[in-house]
Structure formats: structure tokens, C-alpha cells
Amino acid sequence: MQRSEGRETTQLRPVTLTRRYLRHAHGSCLFELGDTKVLCAANFSDAIAGWRRGSGLGWITAEYSLLPASTHTRTRREVSSGAPSGRTHEIQRLIGRTLRAVVDLKQMGERTLIVDCDVLQADGGTRTAAITGAVVAVIDAFDLLRQDGKMTVLPVKEMVAAISVGKVEGEWCLDLNYQEDSQAEVDSNLAITENGQLVEIQGTAEKGSFSRDELMKILDLAGEGVAQLIELQKSALREPL
């Protein structure tokens, strides 16, 4: 098949990570994956949920939103409807779970880290872009606390990133854009750690079903993509601010 950007089936879209994009956030990152652009901001709060109080453990939570002009037709702000949609709620939980999987919550102390992921422009893969950009924002936020003497070590145990894999016109493709995603026979999103551990697998056959062997193909292709993204995260974090 001929992909719309002329990419190979195993090729990511161009990736750009811009750290400290926001002046007032403890950590932030503008993550661009092709035409998908997500602004991730991480901020600490000394408040902790009542059920967590006295545990000595921190907590990470996430919020996700599509800005009105991020999609082909205007997306209504969810605040107007009074509650997030089921899709938004699912993605928020996915981002939070993935970040908590690689952070030592005991090292955080009893504080909450709130991660906001706002989609400025959507062209497929917004949830995976949100996770990958959020990791960089979170590490910078932790580093700020360390510099301020509020933390002795960075509590991030390992890197993590996420990517989509799908079957389009009978071929397995890495990192689907919106056009590809909308016609995919199989669509999946995976979050994988630097050591190859799976945090999340979301996979659906949109037309028919897929086999166990094809599932292994998804895992292998996603692993290759995530490895590339983690190297880009590390490269961005090495850059002087």
C-alpha cells in the first residue's frame, strides 16, 4: 500500500519534542507526531486524596482534552456538557496508569502530580502522543523539585512511550494517521517501557478478527516504534535548556 505521507509501513511520522514550552508549568512538552500536536503540562500539588493520606505515597493523575479547533470540524468543549465523554475518561485513565507504572510513588512523597494533555491538532494517535510527551514533562517537573531540594532523586524507574499499530489494506502499519485509522481493519494502541514491559494493550478488530500470530506482529512492530520514541525522549532530555 502507498501511505499518504510516503512512509514505509514500519516508519514513524516526523517527531519533535519541545521541552519547557510553558513558562509557569513545573514541567511541559509540546509533542508533535506528524500533524498531531499535543501540549503536555505537569504540575505538583501538596494536596493528596483522603484515601492516600498517611500512606507516604504520591499519586499521578491526568486530564486530556481536544481543543475546539483541533479536528476537521469544531469539537465542542466538554466543560459545556458538564462532564468528560467516555472516550476522554478512558484516555485520562490510560495516561495516568502508564505514568504511574514507571514512577516510584514512595519517592514522590505525599503529593499529587497533575498532568494536563491538550490536543492542539489531531491527525490520529493523540492518546499515544499524549503519553509520550507527558513522560518528558513529568521528568522535567521532578527535576525541578530536585533542584529546589524537595526531592533527592528522580523517582522515574524507566522510560515509557506509546504508539499505534494497525492493519490497513491488508498490511501492518506503525503509527497510523487519521485517514489510516479511519479505515483500519485492526487498530491498536500500546504503551511499552524501556525494558520491553507492557503497560497497556488496546486492540480491536474493526472488520472481522485477527489471529494470535498477528497479535505477535503488533507487539513486535510496536516495540520497534516505542524504542525509537524512547531514544527521542532521551535525546530531548539531554539537550540543555
Image (spheres, grey):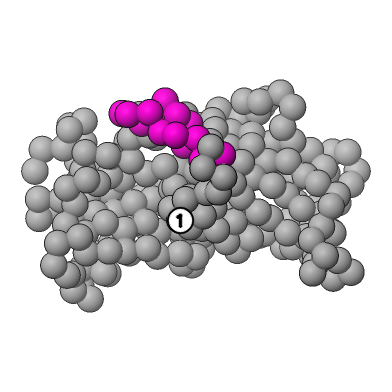
- Tell me where residue 13 appears, x and y as whole percent: 32, 35
Q: Secondary structure at mark 1?
A: helix
Name the residue at 24% across, 54% down.
Answer: 166
The tally of labels here is: 1
- Tell me where residue 206 appears, x and y as whole percent: 20, 60
The magenta-colored residue range is 65-79
Task: Specify the amino acid type for callout 1.
Answer: Gly
Per the image, the residue denoted by label 1 is: 86
Dividing the image into 4 quarters, which one contains the N terminus? Answer: top left
Q: Is residue 78 magenta?
A: yes
Q: Is residue 15 magenta?
A: no
Foreground of the two, 134 or 117: 117
In the picture provided, is 112 more to the left or to the right than 209?
A: right
> How many C-alpha atoms fall within 10 Å of the one at disc 1: few (<14), some, or many (≥20)?
few
In the picture provided, is 237 more to the left or to the right than 199?
A: right
Can residue 227 be seen here? The reply is no
Name the residue at 32% across, 29% down.
Answer: 73
Dividing the image into 4 quarters, which one contains the C terminus? Answer: top right
Q: Is residue 202 above or below residue 139?
A: below
Q: Is residue 74 above or below residue 171?
A: above
Name the residue at 79% across, 69% down.
Answer: 51
In the picture provided, is 145 more to the left or to the right than 163?
A: right
- Tell me where residue 118 appears, x and y as whole percent: 53, 36
Name the residue at 27% across, 49% down.
Answer: 174
Residue 60, quarter of picture: bottom right
Foreground of the two, 60 or 235: 60
- Tell me where residue 89 appears, x and y as whole percent: 51, 55
Can residue 5 be seen here? The reply is yes
In the picture provided, is 123 more to the left or to the right than 182?
A: right
